[in-house]
Image (tube, helix red, strand yellow):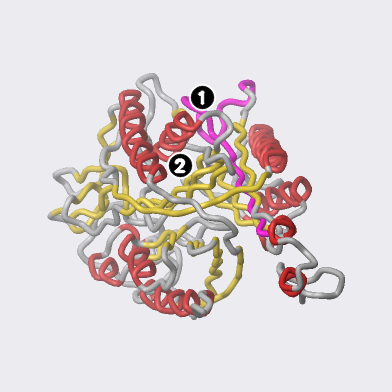
């Protein structure tokens, strides 16, 4: 198949330049330009439909953000939705919407949940759990699809020649959430626990140097308000930490710039402070201490801190022309365990637990190459140490490890978590060692995806 450098009148463009038949400036103009577009739209829930999935109101907007990239040969889209998780039918509907608007085939579209814990679950008709308010659920579905269409339409209209670059920084707004108690390991905040403070940033500029989009990958769950209720009762929707950080970034660059957050290997990572704090009582039972609406001050504080670091990293990036795009979808085999394991979702700390082995399962992996940056996308929530391991073995100059990509598969902890009987290990469908095996296979795929340097 002809490459982007071929053909003009049956003769290679380079040959025509050498012969003097085509001026150099004309040859440069004929070379397809890298183009990008981005857009954001709020998910507007009808006030008449509340409560929706237990939420009685909304504190700040949930949004859909879309990034379109085109190198003249490959076109792809990255969609981030402010939901806790996105089920298959909704992912299919979102991709169909982007295809309809932008003409990008579904395999070249990835959909990610920002993983805010304070958003409704949205189900397809006929797949709603018992007790679901069908009318409210249908309204929520339509609100998400409408926002996806609006964001994709804005991104498509915004398409223009662009340059891009990547960089990294450090943020301390996250902490390992697995803590030791006299009754076993449970949820909390362990300053000495494994964490990955790396903030990875992709900046996409217009040709005049103004940012068109900023995409961030960071290992933290947007769970400041997880489980928190207002002082008068009821929960409020919020895009939480990721939403606050992205709004901060967008405010710095103006209304025509879109900031996207793709959640990293955050299966065992929580915000450093939370409104509803997990505790273990004197009788060994798990509980929570809630500061209610005061928690939104934490959302704003941590969001501003993370956002400021993203802006700092973005400001130091040097963008370049003509990045190469590629997207590959692979499947790897990993060991599984019965899920839910024995008693279902973990409800408190334990000092012993019996895992039940299952058959090997197939794990989808998406590899997106954007110039010298590789984005590794998986469904399960990896432990932070596993994400760092993948990045450490990647041959690319910059690597983002993104979870909750094209669906969710709960937790994929590191091997040590199984020996500790952590919440993640007892709530996982993957067996001990599956995470490390996945890392090795993903590293091999990255080496295959990285062309040899000429």
- Local crowd at mark 2 within 10 Å, few (<14), some, or many (≥20)? many
Query: Can you name the residue that lies furthest to the right here?
Result: 9
- Residue 331 image-quadrant placement: bottom right
What residue range appears in magenta? 47-71
Query: Can you name the residue that lies furthest to the top here?
Result: 232
Disc 2: which residue: 116
In the drawing, does residue 256 fall left or right of residue 432? Answer: right
In the drawing, does residue 143 fall left or right of residue 314? Answer: right
Q: Is residue 182 magenta?
A: no
- Local crowd at mark 1 within 10 Å, few (<14), some, or many (≥20)? some
Image vertical order of residue 28 relative to residue 354, above or below:
above
Q: Identify the disc placed on residue 364.
A: none
Disc 1: which residue: 57
- Secondary structure, mark 1, is strand
- Residue 31 image-quadrant placement: bottom right
- Secondary structure, mark 2, is loop
The residue under the point 37% across, 56% down is 267
From the viewer's side, name the closer residue of 232 and 142: 142
The residue under the point 76% across, 68% down is 20
Residue 322 appears anywhere in the view: yes
């Amino acid at each position: 198949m002809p490459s982007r450098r071929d053909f003009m009148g049956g003769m290679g463009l380079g040959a025509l330049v050498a012969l003097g038949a085509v001026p150099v400036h004309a040859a440069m103009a004929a070379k397809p330009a890298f183009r990008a577009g981005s857009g954001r739209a709020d998910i507007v829930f009808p006030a008449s439909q509340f409560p929706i999935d237990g939420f009685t109101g909304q504190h700040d907007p949930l949004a859909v953000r879309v990034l379109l990239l085109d190198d003249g040969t490959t076109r792809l889209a990255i969609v981030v939705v402010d939901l806790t998780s996105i089920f298959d039918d909704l992912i299919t509907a979102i991709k169909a919407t982007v295809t309809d608007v932008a003409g990008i085939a579904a395999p070249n579209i990835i959909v990610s949940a920002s993983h805010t814990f304070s958003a409704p679950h949205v189900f397809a008709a006929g797949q709603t759990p018992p007790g679901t308010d069908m009318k409210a659920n249908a309204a929520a579905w339509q609100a998400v699809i409408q926002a996806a269409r609006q964001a994709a339409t804005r991104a498509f209209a915004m398409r223009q020649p662009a340059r891009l670059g990547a960089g990294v920084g450090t943020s301390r707004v996250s902490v390992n959430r697995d803590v030791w108690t006299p009754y076993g390991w449970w949820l909390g905040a362990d300053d000495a626990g494994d964490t990955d403070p790396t903030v990875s940033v992709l900046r996409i500029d217009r040709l005049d140097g103004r940012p068109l989009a900023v995409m961030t990958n960071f290992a933290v769950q947007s769970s400041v308000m997880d489980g928190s209720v207002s002082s008068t009762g009821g929960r409020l929707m919020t895009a939480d930490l990721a939403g606050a950080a992205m709004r901060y970034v967008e405010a710095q660059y103006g209304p025509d710039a879109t900031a996207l957050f793709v959640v990293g290997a955050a299966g065992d990572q929580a915000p450093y402070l939370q409104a509803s704090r997990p505790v273990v009582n004197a009788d060994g039972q798990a509980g929570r201490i809630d500061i209610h609406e005061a928690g939104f001050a934490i959302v704003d504080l941590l969001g501003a801190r993370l956002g400021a670091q993203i802006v700092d990293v973005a400001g130091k990036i040097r963008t370049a022309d003509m990045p190469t795009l590629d997207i590959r979808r692979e499947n790897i085999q990993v060991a599984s365990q019965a899920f839910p394991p024995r008693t279902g979702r973990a409800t408190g700390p334990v000092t012993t637990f019996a895992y039940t082995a299952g058959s090997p399962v197939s794990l989808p992996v998406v590899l997106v190459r954007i110039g010298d940056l590789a984005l590794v996308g998986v469904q399960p929530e990896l432990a932070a140490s596993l994400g760092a391991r993948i990045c450490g073995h990647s041959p690319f100059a910059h690597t983002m490890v993104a979870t909750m990509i094209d669906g969710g598969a709960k937790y994929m902890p590191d091997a040590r978590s199984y020996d500790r009987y952590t919440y993640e290990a007892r709530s996982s469908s993957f067996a001990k060692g599956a995470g490390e095996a996945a890392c090795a296979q993903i590293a091999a795929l990255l080496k295959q995806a990285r062309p040899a340097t000429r």
